[in-house]
Image: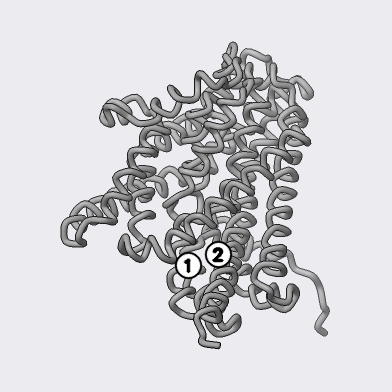
Amino acid sequence: METNSFKFPIPQITYLVKKKLWAQVLVALFFGLVVGIILGPEVGIIEKSTAGTITEWLSIPAHLFLKIIQMIIVPLIFASIIRGLTSAGNLEQLQRLGLGALIYFVITTMIALTIGILIVTTIEPGNFIDSVLIRESFNIEETEPIEKANLTLQDIPQSIIGIIPSNPLSSFMSGEMLSIIVFALIVGVSMISLPKGSSKPILDMLESIQMVTMKIVSWAMRLAPFAAFGLIAGITSKLGLSALTGLAGYMITVIIGLFVMMLVYMIIIKFFAKRPLLPTLAMMKDPQLLAFSTSSSAAVMPLSIKTAEEKMRIKPKISQFIIPLGATINMDGTALYQIIAVFFLAQLFSVELGFTTILLIALTSLAASIGAPSAPGTGIVILSTILIAAGIPPVGIVLILGVDRILDMTRTMVNVTGDLTACLFFDKRSKIKEANKMPT
C-alpha cells in the first residue's frame, strides 16, 4: 500500500549549496551565527580571551578576501570606465543619440543617488548597532572623520582643479580613486574621437585587463562563504544578535530605495513615454525575472532587446544602442545601493560625512557605475572604491557581504527596468522628432 508522505529534499538542497555561491554564503552565515553565540558571553562556556583568539583565526579568510579585492580595484575601474565610454561607437553617434542617452542616464543616476541619501539619512540603519562595539570588533580604535568643515565658495575652484591628476601614475600608486576615474573619463572620451585602428590595441589590452581582474574577483568570491562565516562568528560573539537587527534594517532601507526608484520609472513610462503603465510593466516581466535570478544585466541583454523590439515595438536602432549602452553605464539600482551602503557603514563606524565628502561620494558613485562589469558580485568591488574615497574602513564590506546576494538580485532587476524605460523614453522622443519633420 502506497502512502503519501512528505520527504525533505535533502539531495536538492545539497546540490544547491554545492553549485550556488549565495546558498553557500547563507549556510556559512547560519553556522557563523551558531558559532558566534557559542563563543559569546551569552553562553559563557568559553573565556573571552580564548574566544577572541579563535575569532582572529576564523577571520583570516575575510582579511584575505578584502586584500584581493583592494588589489584589483584600480585596474578594474580604469579599464571598465574607458570600455564603457567607447562602447558608444564613434563620436558622431555619441553626439547624436549617445549624448542624449548619457545625459538621461546621468540624470536618472543622480535621482537614484538623491533617493538613496534621503532614505538612508532618514532611517539611519547604521545606528541600529552599537558603533563602539563595532569598532572594537574590527580592532579600530578611533575613526577620524574625513571632513568636518563645510564647502565654501573659496574652496570650490581648488577642489575642481584638484580632481584633475597632474601625475596619473602617482594617483594609481596612491589609490586616489576620484583622480583615477577622472583620468579614465578623459582618456575614454579622447579614444572615441580616434580612428578605430588607433584605439583598438589599447581597447583590446583593457578588455584583457578587465577579464583578468574579473577572473581574480571570481577566485576571491570563493572565499566569500569562509569570510562570511568568520566575520559573523566574530561579530556575534562580541555584539550578540543585535548585529542581525542592523543588517535587517540595512536591507529594508535598500529595498525601500529601490522601490522608490521603480516609482520614478513608472512616472517616466506614464508621463514621458506616454505608454499604458500596467501593460508596459507586464511586458517587462520576463527580463525582470531573468535579471533577478542571474544578477547580471549582460546575461539579460538579448532578452531585453527582444522584448523591446517584439513586445514594446521599439525601433531596433534605438533598442540595439540604448540597451547595450545602458547595461554598461546605466546602473541606477547599483548606484542607489552603493550610496545607502556607504552611509550605512559610515553610521556604523561613526564616520562623520561633511557636505564635501557627501558630494565626493555621490560623484564617485556616479563615475564608478560607468562601465561597471554587469556581472554578479561586482557591486561589492565598486563599493570598495567609494569607501576608500569616503575614508570609511573597507573591512565593513565583509559585514554586508552575506546579504549582498539578495540585494544584488533586486538591484539588477531595477537596472534592467531602467534600460527598458530608457528605450521607451527615446523611442517616444524619436517619434516626436519624426512627426515634426513631416510636411504639413
Q: Of marks 1 and 2, which one's residue comes earlier in the chain? A: 1
Q: Position of residue 156 (x, y in %)?
A: 49, 25
Task: Name the residue carrying label 2.
Answer: 419
Q: Secondary structure at mark 1?
A: helix
State the count of labels.
Answer: 2
Q: Secondary structure at mark 2?
A: helix
The quarter of the rendered structure image containing the C terminus is bottom right
Q: Position of residue 357 (x, y in %)?
A: 56, 26
Alpha carbon distance from label 1 to label 2: 7 Å
Residue situated in front as seen by the camera: 6 or 182: 182
Residue ID at (75%, 27%): 127
Under mark 1, the amino acid is: Ile
Task: Name the residue carrying label 1.
Answer: 322
Do the residues under discs 1 and 2 have CB atoms within 8 angstroms?
Answer: yes
Residue ID at (46%, 43%): 368
Q: Position of residue 186 (x, y in %)?
A: 32, 43
Q: Position of residue 385 (x, y in %)?
A: 46, 35
Q: Can residue 25 be spotted in the picture?
A: no
Q: Is residue 307 above or below residue 45?
A: below
Residue situated in front as seen by the camera: 42 or 284: 284
> Which quarter of the figure has residue 235?
top right
Residue ID at (64%, 20%): 352
Residue ID at (51%, 62%): 297
